């Protein structure tokens, strides 16, 4: 039904090995139709528009309603393989010296309101993401700097032209936030409509959203991948408290949580349920960022920003936090162990990653004294989600206490968390996250680019902009790696616009009767749920 159609090089899109639990062999069994999948979601969606949002709180409950142009293979999401979703005939090979991609769009696909889907809808949706009108938010616009133009010469043809060949293009197009909207909806209702309305062409039809309770969907009988979905429907139960989510799986009122549990929760469920539980786990393309608002004093002073990142003992912190939080690895801005990631020796050269924490904190205190802020106090703007935000926030506050800085954590619901970053911009220091889907470091580091709409530090740096553009154009891995080290040095050390806290680690215990879902290095991939079935 679906074949692996494209493999990107190891440099730009790499799928690392994922440790599977007992379900690995059973996934080859014949799928059964029927049943409703109940799963728990730790967050309310701030809006329904994935083009604007960056959170799993939108992806998990609403991805089943939408289709993508291409996607990471849901049957092998840990690999660098892409398959057509709305396109047909396989992933196209670039022509015109690597600058032109021509996609053939499937015929007979319909939106849930009955409107036929054509190349014009795909084009309109991608243009909203890549070339948004002024005032229209697009969280991933900076990932598409290589795109020059798009055209839809007929109903089944989409042509995308690049300014220059880029290996980062295809992984960016496969991003699971690139939901395809109806052009008719965009033209008739405007660009705000999808924030509060759902009309996709995905495997499930949106049924209802009961605020604070659940979001549900029913089977799309006319889904364009024949024979799927297998489920009759799904119900995403909103449960911000981890204890409620664990109890739901233990009591079988929910089967799975797609984001991830800490080690203690995994161990408790395995002890309680034995072979009724399956565990899948692996590295996670997601990490927490400490964001300094460079437009607010004293965080406009890089000495203050640098002092605060120097105070953080990431090496020992990773050992302690990984015992109870979904974090594990101390590293830079590139997914750990990727060819573009800094080695341990290279990391030791960055502020906040020095091997001698006493020396690091002595320098931090010196910088604060020099800047006139020895008795610094501030609020840490954070998201009211326990794993790992509040745990990491509490840890950071303790780290800053070691250099005499007093910090109060202000954890707020997701919608308010985003609002302070995007609208009022009156926070001092905040905890953010760079969570990406396809492992594509050259595109992933767009998050820390000053001009990026979802970099909340409000920084400005021409050298970063130039480096980012050069990395996107360069095909020599050695040259890209050299530029990445300079890019990382500016962001984390010299200017300290952002401090990378720790990378996350994904652990998904689920009821053993849940089949057809495979863990990925991201909590955004594989969430359309068309391959999932229940063996009970």
Image (tube, rainbow, N blue to C red):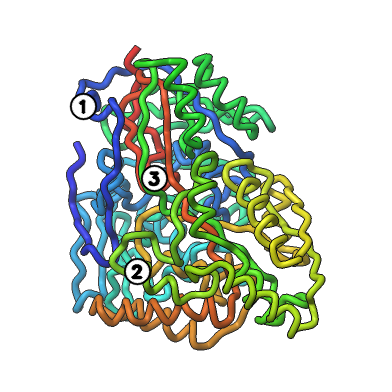
Give coordinates of residue 518: x percent, y percent: 32, 36
Circle 2 residue:
343
Give coordinates of residue 337: x percent, y percent: 32, 60
Observer-nearest residue: 357 or 267?
A: 357
Task: Bin the neighbour count of mark 3 within 10 Å (Cα to Cα): few under 14, some 14-19, many 20 and up.
Answer: many
The tag earlier along the polypeptide, 3 or 1, is 1
Q: Residue at x 30, y 44 (%)?
A: 77
Circle 3 residue:
525
Q: Residue at x 55, y 49 (%)?
A: 55
Task: Bin the neighbour count of mark 2 within 10 Å (Cα to Cα): few under 14, some 14-19, many 20 and up.
Answer: some
What is the spatial separation of the Cα atoms under label 1 and label 2, in whole angstroms? 35 Å
The answer to the question of whether label 2 and label 3 lie on touching residues, with beta carbons closer than 8 A, is no
Q: Quadrant of the N terminus?
A: top left
Give coordinates of residue 536: x percent, y percent: 35, 11
Q: Is residue 493 left or right of residue 5?
A: right
The answer to the question of whether label 1 and label 2 lie on touching residues, with beta carbons closer than 8 A, is no
SS at mark 2 in the image: loop
The answer to whether one can see residue 466 in this image is yes
The tag earlier along the polypeptide, 2 or 3, is 2
Observer-nearest residue: 45 or 220?
A: 45
Q: What is the number of the mark on residue 25?
A: 1
Q: Residue at x 64, y 52 (%)?
A: 395
Observer-nearest residue: 228 or 343?
A: 343
The answer to the question of whether label 3 and label 1 lie on touching residues, with beta carbons closer than 8 A, is no
2 or 3: mark nearer the eye: 2
SS at mark 1 in the image: helix
Q: Is residue 225 left or right of residue 451?
A: left
């Amino acid at each position: 039904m679906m074949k692996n159609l494209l493999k990107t090089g190891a440099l730009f899109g790499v799928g690392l090995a994922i440790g599977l639990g007992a379900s690995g062999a059973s996934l080859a069994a014949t799928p059964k139709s029927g049943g409703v999948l109940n799963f728990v979601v730790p967050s309310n969606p701030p809006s329904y528009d994935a083009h604007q949002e960056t959170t799993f709180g939108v992806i998990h409950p609403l991805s089943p309603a939408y289709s993508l142009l291409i996607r990471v293979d849901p049957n092998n999401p840990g690999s660098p393989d892409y398959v057509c979703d709305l396109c047909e005939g396989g992933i196209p090979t670039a022509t015109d010296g690597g600058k032109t991609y021509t996609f053939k769009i499937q015929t007979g696909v319909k939106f849930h309101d009955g409107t036929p889907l054509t190349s014009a809808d795909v084009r309109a949706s991608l243009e909203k993401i890549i070339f948004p009108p002024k005032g229209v938010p697009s969280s991933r616009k900076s990932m598409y700097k290589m795109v020059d133009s798009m055209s839809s010469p007929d109903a089944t043809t989409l042509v995308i032209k690049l300014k220059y060949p880029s290996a980062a293009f295809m992984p960016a197009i496969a991003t699971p936030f690139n939901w395809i909207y109806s052009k008719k909806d965009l033209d008739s209702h405007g660009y705000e409509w999808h924030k509060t309305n759902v009309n996709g062409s995905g495997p499930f039809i949106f049924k209802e959203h009961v605020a604070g309770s659940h979001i549900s969907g029913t089977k799309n009988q006319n889904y364009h991948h024949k024979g799927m979905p297998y489920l009759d429907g799904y119900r995403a139960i909103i449960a911000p408290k981890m204890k409620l989510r664990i109890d739901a799986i233990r009591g079988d009122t929910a089967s799975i949580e797609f984001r991830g549990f800490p080690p203690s929760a995994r161990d408790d469920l395995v002890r309680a349920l034995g072979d009724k539980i399956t565990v899948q786990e692996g590295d996670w393309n997601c990490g927490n960022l400490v964001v300094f608002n460079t437009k607010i004093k004293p965080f406009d002073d890089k000495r203050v920003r640098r002092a605060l990142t120097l105070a953080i003992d990431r090496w020992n912190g990773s050992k302690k936090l990984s015992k109870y939080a979904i974090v594990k690895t101390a590293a830079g801005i590139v997914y750990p162990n990727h060819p573009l990631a800094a080695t341990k020796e290279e990391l030791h050269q960055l502020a906040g990653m020095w091997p001698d924490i006493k020396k690091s904190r002595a320098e931090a205190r010196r910088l604060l004294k020099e800047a006139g802020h020895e008795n610094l106090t501030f609020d840490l703007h954070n998201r009211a989600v326990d794993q790992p935000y509040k745990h990491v926030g509490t840890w950071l506050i303790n780290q800053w206490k070691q250099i005499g800085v007093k910090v109060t954590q202000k954890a707020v619901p997701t919608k308010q968390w985003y609002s302070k970053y995007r609208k009022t911009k009156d926070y001092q220091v905040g905890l953010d996250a760079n969570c990406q889907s396809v492992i594509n470091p050259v595109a992933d580091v767009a998050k820390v680019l000053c001009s990026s709409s979802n970099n909340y530090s409000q920084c400005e740096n021409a050298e970063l902009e130039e480096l980012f553009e050069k990395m996107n154009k360069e095909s020599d891995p050695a040259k890209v790696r050299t530029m990445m080290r300079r890019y990382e040095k500016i962001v984390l050390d010299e200017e300290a616009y952002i401090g990378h806290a720790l990378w996350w680690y994904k652990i998904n215990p689920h009821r053993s009767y849940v089949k057809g879902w495979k863990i990925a290095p991201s909590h955004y991939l594989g969430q359309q749920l068309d391959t999932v079935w229940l063996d009970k």
